Image (spheres, rainbow, N blue to C red):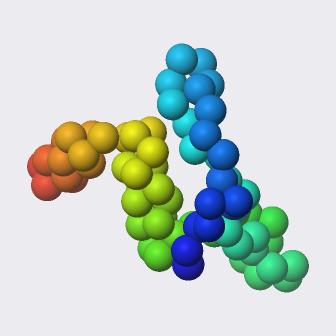
Amino acid sequence: MRISEDEFALDVIDGEPAIITQASVIGQPGSEWEGSPIFKKTYLLELISRSLEHEVIKPEDIQSLIRVAKKL
């Protein structure tokens, strides 16, 4: 899923850069995830890509998370 330029906004919230989007998919009525935002892998990767592109997060932030995850 590609997040197009008109599907997100950039802002600073509580002193931190932020990317604002709509939830990609909401759980369908009657499902166990009804009404819950659902973030699939492709959406999360696109969100990370857009966040890196607009310097909301930096490559070293990702590297730090990878190091922490490897220790778990």
Drawn side of residue 30 relative to residue 54, left or right: right
- Give above or below for 46 relative to 15: below
Q: Give coordinates of residue 69: x percent, y percent.
A: 21, 52
Quarter holding residue 70: bottom left
Give the image location of residue 71, x and y in percent.
Answer: 12, 49
* Most foreground residue, 1 or 36: 1
Q: Position of residue 12 (x, y in %)?
A: 59, 26
Q: Is 69 located above or below residue 19 in the figure?
A: below
Q: Quadrant of residue 2?
A: bottom right
How many numbered marks are there? Answer: 0
Please report the residue visible at 47 percent of the width from the left and 76 percent of the height from the top.
Answer: 42
Instruction: Say if residue 40 shows up in the picture.
Output: no
Is residue 36 toward the left or the right of residue 66 in the image?
A: right
Q: Quadrant of residue 31?
A: bottom right
Q: Where's the N terminus, which quadrant?
A: bottom right
The relative height of residue 63 versus residue 27 in the rendered view (above or below) is: above
Q: Nearer the viewer, residue 49 or 45?
A: 49
x then y, percent, for residue 41 = 45, 73
The single residue placed furthest to the top in the displayed view is 15
Identify which residue is drawn at 47% across, 56% down.
Answer: 50
Q: Residue at x 75, y 70 (%)?
A: 26
Residue most toward the right?
A: 29
Viewer can see residue 6: yes
Query: In the figure, is residue 1 to the left or right of 54?
Result: right
